[in-house]
Image (cartoon, rainbow, N blue to C red):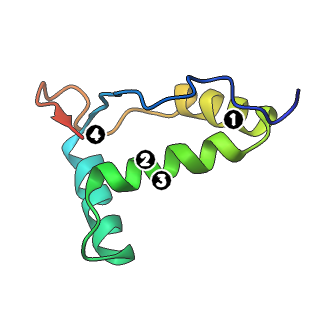
Amino acid sequence: MPGTWRGAPHNTRLSCVITRVTHAWLVEEARRIDAGLTVADVVRGAIAYLRMQPDYVREAVIKATKAAPPDEEAGSGQDQRA
């Protein structure tokens, strides 16, 4: 069925490894939206929004993400976890 999320029907734990540049951007977005939000809140909101999209939109986002050039700090060896 188009647009149906096929993920687990319960909460799952997800670890994301991000660069310092991405982490800083997420912190600024969280502050811009609401002073009480955390980086994890912004990521959860983005994932929830993506889950509501039709399959072809999710597939396009995944394809674009894989094709995107790495951040300038990708090779720094210093991972940030959200």
Foreground label between 4 and 1: 1
Q: CA distance from mark 2 to mark 3?
A: 4 Å
Dot 4: what SS? loop
Which residue does the numbered mark 4 point to in the structure image?
A: 72
Give the percent coordinates (x, y) of residue 4. Answer: 77, 32
Q: CA distance from mark 1 to mark 3?
A: 15 Å
Q: Which quadrant of the figure contains the N terminus?
A: top right
Q: CA distance from mark 4 to mark 1?
A: 25 Å
Q: Is residue 59 left or right of residue 38?
A: right
Q: Residue furthest left?
A: 78
Q: Are marks 1 and 2 in contact (CB under 8 Å)?
A: no
Which residue does the numbered mark 3 point to in the structure image?
A: 45
Q: Is residue 30 left or right of residue 55?
A: left
Q: Residue at x 28, y 73 (%)?
A: 31
Q: Which of pointers 4 and 1 lies earlier in the amino acid sequence?
A: 1
Which residue does the numbered mark 1 point to in the structure image?
A: 58
Q: Between residues 33 and 76, which one lies in front from this camera angle? A: 33
Q: Which of pointers 1 and 2 lies earlier in the amino acid sequence?
A: 2
Other residues around mark 2 within 10 Å, as few (<14) / some (14–19) / many (≥20):
few
Q: Which of pointers 3 and 4 lies earlier in the amino acid sequence?
A: 3
Q: Which quadrant of the figure contains the C terminus?
A: top left
Q: Residue furthest front?
A: 10
Q: CA distance from mark 1 to mark 2?
A: 15 Å
Give the percent coordinates (x, y) of residue 56. Answer: 80, 33
